[in-house]
Amino acid sequence: MRSEIKIKENLKENLEGIKVYKKYTGKKLRIALLLIVIILLLSIIAINAGSTSLKPHQILMTILGQGTDVSQVVIWRIRLPRVLVAIIAGAGLSVAGCVMQNNLRNPLASPSTLGISSASAFGANLAIVVFGAGNIRSTSADAVIINNPYIVTISAFICSMAATMIILFLATLQGFLPECIILAGVAIGSLFSAATTLIQYFAQDVQVAAAIFWTFGDLGRASWREVMIMAIVTTLSIIYFMFRRWDYNAMDSGEEVAKSLGVKVERVGFGGMLVSSLITSVIVSFLGVIGFIGLIGPQIVRRLIGGDHRFLIPISALMGTVLLLISDTIARTLVAPIILPVGAITSFLGAPLFFYLLLRGYKTK
C-alpha cells in the first residue's frame, strides 16, 4: 500500500515537472516561431521594396520562373541575393557575438571588441591604395567604385584572420583569460586603425574615397557565389556551436563549475572564439563593416528567454536576421532611389538600443 502511494506521489511530481518544462520551453518556441514569421514578412517587404515596383503575384511568378525579363533581373540578380545576404549575415554576426559574450564572460563583447573589424578595414585599405583596387567613374552619380572586389575581399579576410590568430596566441600565453582577450583585441584594433590612417594619409583622394566607401557596409556587393560561401560557413559554424551548447551553459556558471563538470574550458573557449572570428572575417570581408548586430542581437534575446544556449544560439541567429533585414530595408527606402550604407543604419538603430539595455541592466542589479 505504501509503495503504491509512493509511486503515485512520484508520478505526480514527474507530471508537474513535465508541465514546468513545457512552460519553460513553450515561451522560447513561441518567440522563435514569431521571429520566423517576422523574417518571412520582412523578406517579402524587402523583395518588393525598390525603385522598380513589383506586385506580390509578379514576385511569385518570377521566383517560379515565369516572370518578365525585367522582373527576372530585378529579383534574381539584385533583390533576392540581397535578402539572402541579410538573412545569412545577420544570423552569423549575431551568433558570433553570442558565443564571444559567453566565452569572454563579458556582455559587451562583440567582433569589434577583438579588433576584427579594424583588421578587415586595414586589409581593404591596403588592397585599394597599394594594389590599386579603387577607382573613379567619369559620371557624377555613384562615382567611387571598387574595380577589383576580389582583391579587397581576400586582403580583408587575410588581415582579419591574422588579427584573430595574434589575439588567440597572446591569450594562450596567459592561460586564455578573458581579460587578456579583451586587452589584446583593443591593442590589435588600435594598431590596425593607426595603420589604416597612415595608408590613407599617403593615398590619393580617389583611393581614400574608395576605401571609406568600402567601410560603410553594403549588402548589395555579394553575388550568388558569395551568398553560397557565407551560407556554408555560417551554417557549419552554428552546427558546431549547437554541439557545444551544454559546455557554454556550464561556462555561464563560472570557470570552476564548468571544470568540475568536465568541460575543458580553455579548449572550448579557444574553439568558440576561432569559429566566431571565422564567421565575422568572412562576412566583413565580403560586405564591409556592419556594426552592432553581434552586440545587440544576443542581448535582446538573452533578456527575452534567458541564458540557455540550447535556445539562445538559434534564436540569436533569428534576431540578428530581423535586425539586419529591417536596417537594410530602411537603408534602401528612406531616401530612395539613393541607398544608404547599411552599417550606418545599424549603428543608428543599435546605439540607442544598446544604451537602453545597458541602463536597464544596471537598474535591475
Image: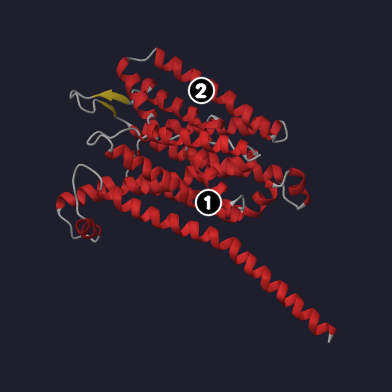
Q: Nearer the viewer, residue 149 or 91?
A: 91
Q: Quadrant of the N terminus?
A: bottom right
> Residue 51, located in which quarter of the rendered image?
top left
Image quadrant assignment for residue 291: top left
* Numbered-mark total: 2
Side of 321 where 141 appears, left or right: left
Q: Which mark is residue 238?
A: 1
Mark 2 belongs to which amino acid? Phe
Residue 93 higher or lower than 43, as above or below: above
Rendered view: 229 above or below 104: below
Residues tagged 2 and 1 counted as in contact (Cβ below 8 A): no
Furthest toward the right, the residue is: 2
- The residues bearing labels 2 and 1 have C-alpha atoms spaced at a distance of 29 Å
**Picture coordinates of residue 306, whole percent (x, y):** 60, 51
Residue drawn at x 40%, y 13% as measured from the top left? 201
> Residue 332, percent across and down?
29, 39
- The answer to whether one can see residue 230 in this image is no
Secondary element at tag 1: helix
Label of residue 288 in the image: none
Hey, which residue is sitting farthest front in the picture? 363
Looking at the image, residue 285 lies above or below residue 314? above
Residue type for callout 1: Ile
Residue found at x 36% / y 49%: 84
Q: Position of residue 80 (x, y in %)?
A: 30, 50
Residue 192, label in figure: 2
